[in-house]
Image: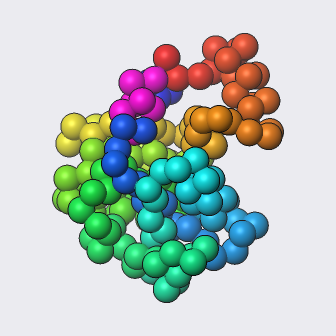
């Protein structure tokens, strides 16, 4: 389970990147990107085959991101997460959020060994304040059963 300290550290970044963002508004990577933007965060989309997403320039990889990006959210298969986290650590990024289904124990261990904070397997939409819709209910249920990061 991830710690509250890791969640808090993630949200102290000046800028973020969503790795695996989709141009399709029905896909989860697109939802994460749009929600982060709607909450006022500086966030960049990353996908190797998109020029733009939601009207924003889309970056091909972690290496091409602006230097102020300190936190990444992965919405890609675990094998890709491992490669992305390696690139992020090489760039000196300090915060990694692996969405459920994207989490990689190998990547998490490498990130922690490099001194990065890791949120592994938690849905970021349950932590983007103010939390809306079904994620608010999910967060409430998780609090009742002690499943929120402590």
* 115 on left or right of 33: left
Q: Which residues are magenta?
A: 4-10
Residue 137: x and y in percent read 79, 29
Q: Give the total of numbered labels.
A: 0
Name the main secondary structure of what is drawn in magenta: helix
* 7 on left or right of 145: left
Residue 101 seen in this snapshot: no
Residue 107 against residue 84 in the figure, above or below: above
Residue 84 against residue 122 in the figure, above or below: below
Residue 104: x and y in percent read 45, 49
Tell me where residue 115 sits by quadrant.
top left
The colour mode here is rainbow
Kindly identify the residue that appears in the image at 27 percent across and 57 percent down: 68
Q: Nearer the viewer, residue 113 or 13?
A: 13
Q: Nearer the viewer, residue 32 or 115?
A: 32
Residue 139 seen in this snapshot: yes
Residue 73: x and y in percent read 47, 53
Tell me where residue 127 sits by quadrant.
top right
Q: Residue furthest front?
A: 40
In the rendered image, residue 124 lying in the magenta stretch gets the answer no
Kindly identify the residue that appears in the image at 36 percent across and 73 percent down: 61
Kindly identify the residue that appears in the image at 74 percent across and 39 percent down: 132
Kindly identify the residue that appears in the image at 72 percent across and 13 percent down: 144
């Amino acid at each position: 389970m991830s710690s509250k300290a890791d969640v808090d550290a993630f949200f102290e970044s000046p800028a973020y990147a969503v790795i695996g963002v989709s141009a399709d508004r029905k896909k989860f990577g697109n939802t994460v990107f749009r929600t982060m933007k709607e909450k006022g965060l500086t966030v960049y989309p990353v996908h190797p085959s998109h020029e733009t997403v939601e009207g924003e320039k889309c970056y091909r990889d972690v290496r091409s991101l602006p230097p102020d990006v300190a936190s990444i959210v992965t919405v890609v298969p675990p094998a890709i997460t491992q490669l992305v986290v390696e690139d992020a650590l090489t760039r000196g990024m300090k915060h990694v959020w692996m969405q459920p289904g994207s989490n990689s124990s190998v990547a998490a261990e490498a990130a922690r060994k490099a001194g990065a904070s890791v949120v592994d397997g938690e849905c970021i939409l349950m932590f983007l304040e103010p939390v809306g819709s079904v994620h608010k209910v999910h967060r409430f249920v998780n609090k009742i059963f002690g499943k929120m990061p402590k």
